[in-house]
C-alpha cells in the first residue's frame, strides 16, 4: 500500500498543472484514506466580484438565519470585510503569522496563501457565539 500510495503521489505531483486535475480521476485510483493524504487545496481568488457588496451581506445574513444549528439556536455570527477592511485584516494576519512562524515555513507556505487571500475581493469570517447556549450547572 505504501508503494502504491507513493506512486500515486508521484503521479499526482508530476502532472503539469495539479490544480486542473479532476478529483474523480484521483479518487478512482485510491482509497478514501489515501485520497485524504494526497488531497490539495487550490486557491483561485479574484479581486473583483460580479455580486454587489450589499448582496454579499444579504447572502451571509440569510445563511446565518436559515443555516442549520444545534437545537435551532442560531448561534452563528459573521463578519464581512470588504475593500480596505479586508486588506487591513490580511495585513494583520500576515504580521501575526510572521512573528510566530519560522522563516522557511513562512516563506514557503504562508506568504503565497496570505497574499492570495489579501488579493481576493473580501473575507467572511464565521464563528459560533457560545453565549447563546445556557449550559446551566455542570
Image (cartoon, rainbow, N blue to C red):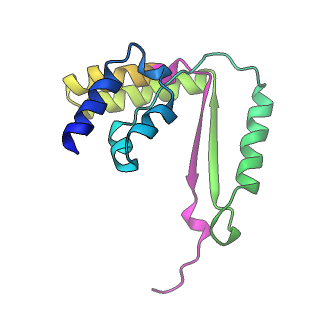
Q: Residue furthest top?
A: 16
Q: Position of residue 132 (x, y in %)?
A: 62, 67
Q: Considering depth in this image, is 36 or 125 the residue closer to the camera? A: 36
Residue 111 falls inside the magenta stretch:
no
Going 42% across and 21% down the picture, which residue do you hit? 18
Q: Position of residue 126 (x, y in %)?
A: 58, 47
Q: Is residue 88 left or right of residue 31?
A: right
Q: Position of residue 14 (x, y in %)?
A: 31, 18
Determine which quarter of the picture holds residue 122: top right
Q: Is residue 33 left or right of residue 7?
A: right
**Number of marks:** 0
Determine which quarter of the picture holds residue 128: bottom right
Q: Considering depth in this image, is 103 or 12 the residue closer to the camera? A: 12
Going 35% across and 21% down the picture, which residue do you hit? 111
Going 49% across and 24% down the picture, which residue do you hit? 43
Tell me: residue 99, above or below residue 20.
below
Please state, as top left, top right, bottom left or bottom right, where the C terminus lies in the image: bottom left
Please state, as top left, top right, bottom left or bottom right, where the N terminus lies in the image: top left
Tell me: residue 82, above or below residue 37.
above
Q: Considering depth in this image, is 23 or 119 the residue closer to the camera? A: 23
Q: Residue furthest bottom?
A: 137
Q: Position of residue 62 (x, y in %)?
A: 77, 48
Residue 120 falls inside the magenta stretch:
yes
Magenta-highlighted residues: 116-138
Tell me: residue 50, above or below residue 135.
above
Amino acid at each position: 500500500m505504501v508503494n502504491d500510495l507513493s506512486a500515486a503521489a508521484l503521479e499526482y505531483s508530476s502532472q503539469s498543472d495539479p490544480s486542473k486535475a479532476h478529483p474523480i480521476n484521483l479518487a478512482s485510483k485510491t482509497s478514501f484514506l489515501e485520497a485524504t493524504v494526497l488531497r490539495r487545496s487550490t486557491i483561485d481568488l479574484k479581486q473583483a466580484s460580479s455580486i454587489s457588496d450589499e448582496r454579499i451581506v444579504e447572502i451571509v445574513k440569510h445563511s446565518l438565519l436559515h443555516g442549520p444549528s444545534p437545537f435551532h439556536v442560531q448561534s452563528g455570527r459573521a463578519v464581512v470585510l470588504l475593500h480596505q477592511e479586508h486588506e487591513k485584516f490580511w495585513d494583520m494576519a500576515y504580521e501575526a503569522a510572521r512573528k510566530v512562524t519560522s522563516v522557511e515555513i513562512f516563506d514557503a507556505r504562508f506568504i503565497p496563501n496570505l497574499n492570495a487571500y489579501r488579493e481576493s475581493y473580501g473575507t467572511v469570517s464565521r464563528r459560533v457565539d457560545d453565549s447563546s447556549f445556557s449550559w446551566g450547572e455542570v
